[in-house]
Amino acid sequence: MTEQLNTGSHDLPVTEALAAFMRTGWADTRRADVEPLPVAPWAAKRRAALAARFPGERLVVPSGTLRTRSNDCDYRFRPHSAYAYLTGAGEPDDVLVVEPSGEATLYLRPRSPREEGEEFYRDRRYGEFWVGRRPDLAEAALLYQMECAHIRDLDLKGPARVLRGVDARIDSLVPAGGGDAELESFLSEMRLVKDEWEVGELQAAVDATARGFEDVVRALPAALGHPRGERYLEGVFGLRSRLEGNAVGYESIVASGAHACVLHWIRNDGRLRGGDMLLLDAGVETDTLYTADVTRTLPLSGRFGTVQRQVYDLVYEAQQAAIATLRPGARFRDFHLAAMRVVSEGLRDWGLLKDPVDALMESGLYRRYTLCSSGHMLGLDVHDCARARAETYLDGVLEEGQVLTVEPGLYLQPDDLTLPEEFRGLGVRIEDDLVITADGARLMSDALPRRADDVESWMASLLG
């Protein structure tokens, strides 16, 4: 594979004298303190499981490529989740190859020696002076505990299954085959059940997220006085995510008032008003790229109003019913159906819907007020394992070690004339992260209160 120097549109020319000068006089910075990443032994087990699923075949999993944000500026890179799962590595343009023998090699771009060229100081995408140091091949082999080779030595002649759509260069090197889709599905399905290390990383993400929610509550007095209060709180949570992890695991939803009725409100440019509620849906992503996904709906005054509490309590009861279904062997869809039955009963009791509950469950009329599903798998992706086959995920059964969210909600649109005026513009979601255990499920996000009374007490304790 050929390499090209990535210089900017306003790059200054380099004289021969400067080029020669830049190649000399550098100290040896090879690291003697490199230790294997904690994930390395777990990643090795995953690669072995992958090789066993496709014996005698070559498997190619790229990390992904840099994406341009504007002109010559890139977005911060995040590797494809399947690649991160199998290697623990996180640099762009790298490729994992599992050979027919089952042996794996990580092809990567090592740091460029100072005496061999100009990349280290001229290349704006990969140069050490521009983006920081990469490990050399020996360091990489120690970090990842696997064979590592230079990306320029990658040779993909011959048949292979490729994780496609990740790196166009790799796609072009291997003709597409019918087995590629099967590889993609398996790479999702093998992440459905988390190992012990992954559960620990997810718990760390959830714990940091809880601290971020506390930060947000403490910042409410200042945010209430700001014309972009939502964005103020987004920044507060974002600070926690960068201090304790890699970033937010997804764009934070900071939705006050009727913005809470927009399922994926990420503009976060609204003002906070004391009598409204705030829907905060946010998660810290760890340095190892596992993300939490938690939602709380908070009264900005510190106390729920009568109608606000009525809506909140119904969502809470729906979540309680959903959580009660979680155990190994239960159908994945059961928790959503349990939540929606409670919601349908509540909407009927309020007089918003007239049909019997069984008829409402059949017709789906309740979905006008609670459009989406009530949860999903969680892990390296916030909506994890999305390429898994329906029979192993949506139509499958729960297993010990799976981690998922439970997040029923009611979204009562401000222009919905089927609603009494006092209900319009109220949006409530309560979302928690749970791990399936041998006999049920453990609430990973129990550091954050869920009952209305407890939410009010918690807010009061943080606001003094």
Image (cartoon, rainbow, N blue to C red):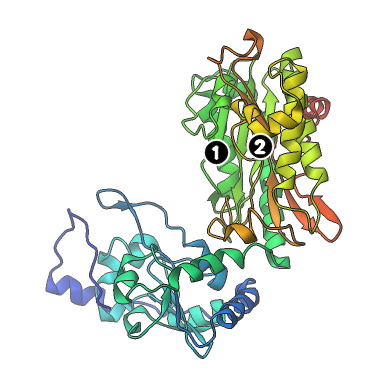
Residue at (57, 50) in percent of width and height: 383
Residue 347: x and y in percent read: 72, 22
Q: CA distance from mark 1 to mark 2?
A: 10 Å
Q: Is residue 392 left or right of residue 24?
A: right
Residue at (65, 10) in percent of width and height: 420
Quarter of the image with the C terminus in it: top right
Tell me the SS state at disc 1: loop
Residue at (67, 20) in percent of width and height: 300
Q: Is residue 93 left or right of residue 203?
A: left
Residue 154: x and y in percent read: 35, 82
* Tag 1: amino acid: Ser
Residue 355: x and y in percent read: 72, 22
Label ID, residue 85: none
Q: Can residue 315 be seen by looking at this rendering?
A: no
Label ID, residue 252: 1
Residue 314: x and y in percent read: 76, 26
Q: Can residue 262 be seen by looking at this rendering?
A: yes
Q: Nearer the viewer, residue 403 or 353?
A: 353
Image: 226 above or below 107: above
Mark 2 neighbour density, 10 Å: few (under 14) some (14–19) many (20 or more): many
Q: Residue furthest top?
A: 421
- Give the mark, 1 or 2, whose residue is nearer the N terminus: 1
Q: Is residue 262 left or right of residue 354?
A: left
Image: 155 above or below 121: below
Quarter of the image with the N terminus in it: bottom left
Tell me the SS state at disc 2: strand
User: In the figure, residue 283 lies in which quadrant?
Assistant: top right
Image: 258 above or below 317: above
* Tag 2: amino acid: Thr
Mark 1 neighbour density, 10 Å: few (under 14) some (14–19) many (20 or more): many
Q: Nearer the viewer, residue 220 or 184?
A: 184
Residue bearing mark 2: 295
